Image (tube, grey):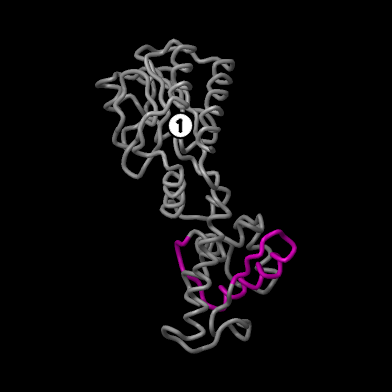
Amino acid sequence: MDEQTQQQLTVTAAAQAGLGPAELWIAYYAMGGSLSQVEVKAYLLGEQGIPQLEGDILALTLNEILPDTASELRVPYSTDGQGMNTDSTSSAGDGTPEAAGIDEAGDILERALEDLGAAGTSFLTPAQAEAERLRAVERTGLVDTPAEERFDRITRQAKEHFGVSSASVALIAKQRQFLKSVIGPLGQNTPRDIALCSETIRRAGPLIINDTLNDPLFKNNPLVTGEPRIRFYAGYPLIGSGGWAVGTLCIIDQNPRNFTVEDQQVLRDLAEDAQREIDD
């Protein structure tokens, strides 16, 4: 079992067991582990390696806990893990039992990450989390597809209800924002690094910007200083498979405005309508 695969499976198993770094460290220390809590957390985040024996103790800790949960995942031990390895041999190379075990572990990891979804974000590196999110975007099957009335109905309703210049259903791909539905002066494709909706998908709830010129994060954004000169923005995240945020329902206007609690509820209701269309 290579160290990286064991580390990834340890992270996934900890998430499925509902253990954060602190809770896992306590259980691991009780099993005889010698690493500090800081070292264990750095290992889980992929920031540093640890001795093989300590990795096996972490695996043993989780394998003692996991049978009491709904998870069927088990963390393999290293090939020379002080007698703890029961699933592989010391042979190596393609076609050997060890190589087969590594391949199987990789398959287990891939399935576990898919099952865990966004709930395990804190156990993934930013790059891993973004890769999973992009897979969820791809699974919607909506990027680069034509406009559809089922989404246009929602954006029309949003524009008319709030009296804004534009409303859209956006999907955030790797390098761009694709508007599946748009009513108003917005381009269908916008570079992701300037799209306001790219910030919305980082949140669990709505992003409301009453006046972009008073917001330090957005006041110099090209979409604010240039066309379409966004002054007001409100967006609500849309969720894809695995709980990953794949896009937004958003409204914009060229004038700053207040946005009440009641307004936020209407935006949420419309986002739920869009969500149901994505789920279909």
Look at label 1 and name its amino acid: Thr
> Residue at coordinates 30% horizontally, 22% vertically from top-left?
224
Q: Quadrant of residue 279?
A: top right
Instruction: Please indicate whether residue 45 sits to the left or right of residue 232 in the image.
Output: right
Above or below, 105 against 266 in this view is below
> Residue at coordinates 66% horizontally, 55% vertically from top-left?
18
Q: Is residue 72 magenta?
A: yes
Give coordinates of residue 9: x percent, y percent.
Answer: 55, 66
Give coordinates of residue 84: x percent, y percent.
Answer: 63, 82
- Number of numbered discs: 1
Name the one closer to the observer, 238 or 61.
238
Q: Which residues are magenta?
A: 46-75
Q: Is residue 45 magenta?
A: no
Q: Residue furthest bottom?
A: 91
Q: Which residue is mark 1?
A: 248
Above or below, 177 against 34 in this view is above
Name the one closer to the observer, 33 or 180.
180
Name the one closer to the observer, 128 or 169.
169
Above or below, 127 against 238 in this view is below
> Residue at coordinates 35% horizontally, 45% vertically from top-left?
174
Q: Secondary structure at mark 1?
A: strand
Q: Residue furthest right?
A: 68
> Residue at coordinates 47% horizontally, 23% vertically from top-left?
208
